Image: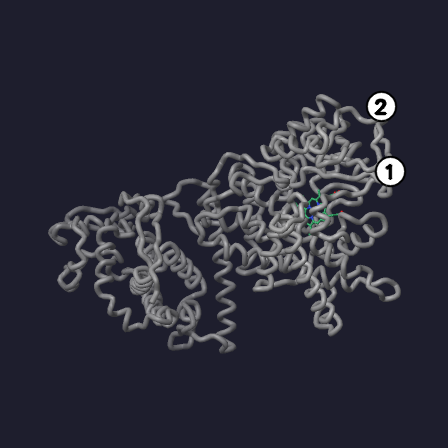
Amino acid sequence: SNRLPPGSLGVPIIGHSLGLTRAMKANTAEKWIEQRIKKYGPISKLSLFGKPTVFVYGPAANKFVFNGDSSTIANQQTKSMRMILGDRNLLELSGKDHKRVRGALVSFLKPESLKKYVEKIDGEIREHLKLHWQGKEQITVLPMMKTLTFNIICSLLFGLERGPKRDQFVSNFKTMMVGMWSVPVNLPFTRYNGGLKASARVQNMVKDLIQEKRRKLEQKTASPHQDLITCLLSIRDENGQEVITEKEIVHNVMLVMVAGHDTSSVLITFLVRLLANDPAVYAAVLQEQEEIAKDKSMGEFLTWEDLTKMKYTWRVAMETLRMIPPSFGGFRNTLKDVEYNGYLIPKGWQIFWVTSMTHMDNTIFPEPSKFDPSRFENQASIPPYCYLPFGAGYRVCPGNEFARIETLLVIHRLVTRFTWKLQCPDNAFSRNPMPVPTKGLPIQIITVCYITLEICFLNFTRYNGGLKASARVQNMVKDLIQEKRKKLEQKTASPHQDLITCLLSIRDENGQEVITEKEIVHNVMLVMVAGHDTSSVLITYSGIFGIQNDNANLITEIAKHIKNLKICFIANDLNLSFLQEIKMKYTWRVAMETLRMIPPSFGGFRNTLKDVEYNGYLIPKGWQIFWVTSMTHMDNTIFPEPSKFDPSRFEDQASIPPYCYLPFGAGYRICPGNEFARIETLLVIHRLVTRFTWKLQCPDNAFSRNPMPVPTKGLPIQIVPKKLK
Ligand code: HEM
C-alpha cells in the first residue's frame, strides 16, 4: 500500500462522489480538482461512484490513459450506460473487437466519405431553422440544438427521414437518455427502469430498420453508402461474410445516437452564446461566412469546398471546446496491476482523467482564461496529448469530423440569417455531466433585415452588412427569374402564376419584354421589403424612395398584378370567399380610422430636380420637400374632433376632400399595394376575432416611431382561443 498514490478513499461507498457531483453542478469542478492537485500533486487516490480510483493529470498522464495497452487498461462506463446502450457498443469493446467495429464506423465517419453528405446535412439544418427559428421571437437554444443534431443523425446516419416513425424514435430516445444518467436501480417506476424499457423499444426499431435496409440492399434499391446502417451491413470479409454482427450494429447505432447528439449540441449552444457576447469574434465570423454566402445563389447548398474556407469559425469552435469541453473527462478500468510514475494502480481500480485541467494549464495555453482563437492558427505547435476535447489515442472520437461539419454549417446558417440577444446574460453553466448554460440559453431572435435605411441607421457596419445582404438577395432573385423564364418558355409556368412570371410576360407590340431584368429585380426587392414587416410598410418605402425608375407603366403593371394576387389570396383561404370579403365594410372602416390616427408612414421626401416655386416661395434645385401625413389627418377642419376614434367618418368616403386622407399616399405614386393590404388586413382580423379573444399585457397605448410606429414591447398580448363551432 506504500506504493499507492497519496490521498484517501474517503467514507466507504460514498467516497468523493457527492463532492465531485456537487462541484460539477455548481460549475466548480475544476476548482475542486485544482485543490486536490495542490494537496496531493498530479496523481492521487480517491473513491468515486463506489470504486477506488486514481486521478491523473498532465500530458504524460493523458498519453498513459489514452494509449495504454488495452489488455491492461480498458474503457469503463457506468452500469446504466452499459445496460441501456448494449454490451457490444464500442465503449465496451477492446482489442481486436474494438478495432474491427471502430474501423467499420470510421469507414462511414471519415472525412472522405462525409464529404458527400454536406448538402444533406445543410438541408436538414435549413429545414430546422425554417420550422423552429424563423418568425419566432424567443427560443431556448440547447433543446433546439439537441433536436437538430438528433434529426441530423436520424436522417444521415440511419436514413430515417421526418415523419411519425422518427417522432416515435425521438420520444423513446428521450426517456432512454434520462435512464442512462440515473442510478441503476431496476424497480418499476424508477428512471432506470423506464430507460431500460425505452432502450428495448429503440433497439427493436433499429432492428426493423436493419431488416428493411438489408432487404433494400438485396433488391439493390439501396446503396451501401446511403447511410451508416447500409454501410455497416455492406462491410464483408474476404469470404463475403458480414464483418459486423446485427447485435453490434444495433448497439453501436445506440451509441452513435447518444454520443453524436449530446456533445455537438452543447458546442453549438456555447458558440451561440459566445457570438452574442463577443462583438469582435462575431464580426470576424460573420465576415468569413458572408464572404462564402455572397457567391451562393438562392437555395444553393453549402459544399465541402465552402467548409474548407471556414477556418476562423472553426478556430473559434476549437477555442470554445478548449474552455468548455463538452466531455469533462472519463474513466478507464485496470485489468491488471499497473505502474504509473512510480505508483501502483491495482487491478480493478478506476483511472480518472480530466480534460479541462490540461486545457487550462498556462504552461501549455498561455493566459488560459482569455478567449483567443488565434492559438489554433498553428495547430502543429500544440504538443501532443494537450488538447483533448475529442480524447486522443486509439479511442479518439471518431465523430469529430462529423461534429466539425455540422457545427460549421449551423453557424453559417445562423449568422447569415439571424441576429440574437441573450435573455439571461449571466454566463453561468452547470455540468450534468454535460455543461448546460442557465435555463438552456433562452435568446431573443432578431431576423436579419435585408436592407437597412441609410438615413435611419448611420451605423456603418449595419448599413454595410445590409448592402452585402442586398447583393445576395438580388442574386437569388436573378436565379428565380432565370428559372421562371425557362418554365415560361417550356410552358410549365403560367404568366399569372406570380409577380415575376407576370412581369416577364408583359410584351410590347413587337413581342419585346416591357420590363427589364434589372427593373424586375429592383422592384421585387421593393415589394419584398414593403410586404415583409406589414403590408403597410410598402406605403412608407414607396413614399421615401419612390420607385427609382420613373416608369409609370411599371407601377401600373405592379398594381394590376396585385389585383391578381387578390384572387389567389382568397382562393387560398378555403372558407372566406371574395363575396364575404367585400361585406366587411365596418371592419375596413375601423382599419381606415386606425390608419388615419396612426398612419404607418409618418411622411416622406421628394427631391427637387429644378428650382420650383410653391405658395410664393422658392424651393431650390436639389433640396428635399418633406411631407407629413399625420398633420393633415389630425386637422380638425378636415376631420372634426380628430382625436376621437370614429370609424363612421368613412361611411361616405366621397365626402372626404382629395389629398386629405393619405395613409397610402396620393397621385401617381399612390401605393399600388393598398388593395393587397386591405385584403390581408380583413382576412387576418376575421380569423382573429372569430377564433380568439385577447388582453393587452402592456395596456399603456404608447408607441414610438422607428420609423414605423412600434407599440410598447411589440404589443405582447394574452390570447384566449374561442371554442370553434
Ligand atoms: C463536439 C462534439 C463531440 C465531442 C466533444 C466528442 C468527444 C468525445 C470524447 C471525449 C470521446 C471519448 C474518447 C475516450 O474515451 O478516449 C468520444 C468518443 C466517441 N465519440 Fe465523440 N464527441 C463529439 C461528437 C461525436 C459525434 C458527432 C459522434 C458520432 C457521429 C461521436 C461518436 C463517438 C464514439 C462512437 C466514441 C467512442 C470511441 C471509441 O471508444 O473508440 N462523437 N467523443
From the top left corner, tell me how far across and down residue 509 is, in percent: 38, 77
Indicate how the structure is coloured in the image. Answer: one colour
Please report whichever mark, 2 or 1, sits nearer to the chain's N-terminal start. 2
Name which quarter of the figure residue 500 lies in.
Answer: bottom left
Disc 1 residue type (three-letter):
Lys
Secondary structure at numbered mark 1? loop
- The foreground one among 431 and 45 is 45
Q: Nearer the viewer, residue 532 or 157?
A: 157
Which residue is label 1 attached to? Answer: 336
Mark 2 nearby-residue class (10 Å; few <14, some 14–19, many ≥20): few
* Residue at the spot 25% in from the left edge and 58% down from the top edge: 591
**Does any portion of residue 593 appear in the rendered image?**
yes
Q: Residue 357, relative to residue 503: is it above or below?
A: above
Q: Is residue 308 visible?
A: no
Q: CA distance from mark 2 to mark 1?
A: 18 Å
Amino acid under disc 2: Asn
- Give the label on residue 2, or none: 2
Helix, strand, or loop for circle 2? Answer: loop
